[in-house]
Image (tube, helix red, strand yellow):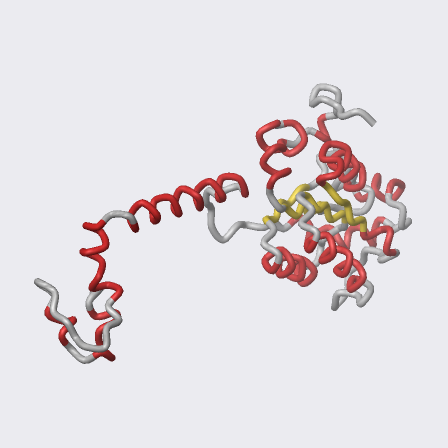
Amino acid sequence: MSTQSAKERPESLQFPFLDDEDTISTLKESKTFLILRGLPGSGKSTLAQAIQDRYKDACKVISVDSYKIPPSVRSTVPEEYSKVDEDLVDYCKREISVIVLDDTHHERERLDQLFDIADKYRYKVIFAEPKTQWRLDCLQLKDKNQWKLSVEELKKLKPSLEKEFLPMYFGWFLSKRSSEMLRKAGQAFLDELGSLKAFKKESKHCMYRRVLPRSYPGDEVVTGSKRNKFGQILN
């Protein structure tokens, strides 16, 4: 299937991670969880397929529907999710760039489990919700969801999905390529400093490890006991 341009795709499938080339390039070189949230029948699987088509081999989709776990309001996360997590961890260990998680994701406990996995394997998390006009219309969703959930069952799922997730902080995050460039620049800077005699002379007291104490001009603390040398001279 050929990749559709933004103009060819319906408005409900127009997202920066599908349309913007810089965003796509960055995600392909990074490690990202794309967590799709929404009521059953709202268009998550269609969105997941569009992402798969766009990122091809750089992407894997985990659809919870294929694990036969019906969405419902429950007190605990079902044990069946352990198989989902096994497959997810396998993709993480293989360092798949973009992992799409297609589920309702209406439970905070379940999301916390995913956040823990993302943190362990150093994946960033992006939430995405379908933009279909019927995404919150339980009457229409009754006829569209594959689980044949009733209007009342859908309404029970709705409140938790209407709650927005607010980030704890905002910031600029380096891509894998940019962080590697920064690391190399930092290493080159340290190597250059290490080759300068003047820097070595000035930094000797910071690396002081001699058995016998030795005084340096203007640095009286160094003449104390060996146990107290480290740390004090940097105050």
Q: Against 215, is 123 above or below?
A: above
Q: Position of residue 54 (x, y in %)?
A: 73, 32
Task: In this rendered view, identify the residue nearer to me: 163 or 208.
Answer: 208
* Image quadrant where residue 41 sits: top right
Count of numbered badges drawn on the protein: 0
- Residue at figure coordinates x 65%, y 27% from the top left: 19
Task: In this rendered view, identify the residue nearer to me: 13 or 71.
Answer: 13
Q: Position of residue 142 (x, y in %)?
A: 87, 44
Please state, as top left, top right, bottom left or bottom right, where the C terminus lies in the image.
bottom left
Q: Position of residue 217 (x, y in %)?
A: 8, 63
Q: Against 94, is 98 above or below?
A: above
The residue furthest top is 7
Q: Position of residue 188 (x, y in %)?
A: 38, 44
67 on left or right of 91: right
- Residue at figure coordinates x 47%, y 50% from the top left: 169
| Residue 159 in sight | no
Task: In this rendered view, identify the residue nearer to me: 224 or 110.
Answer: 224
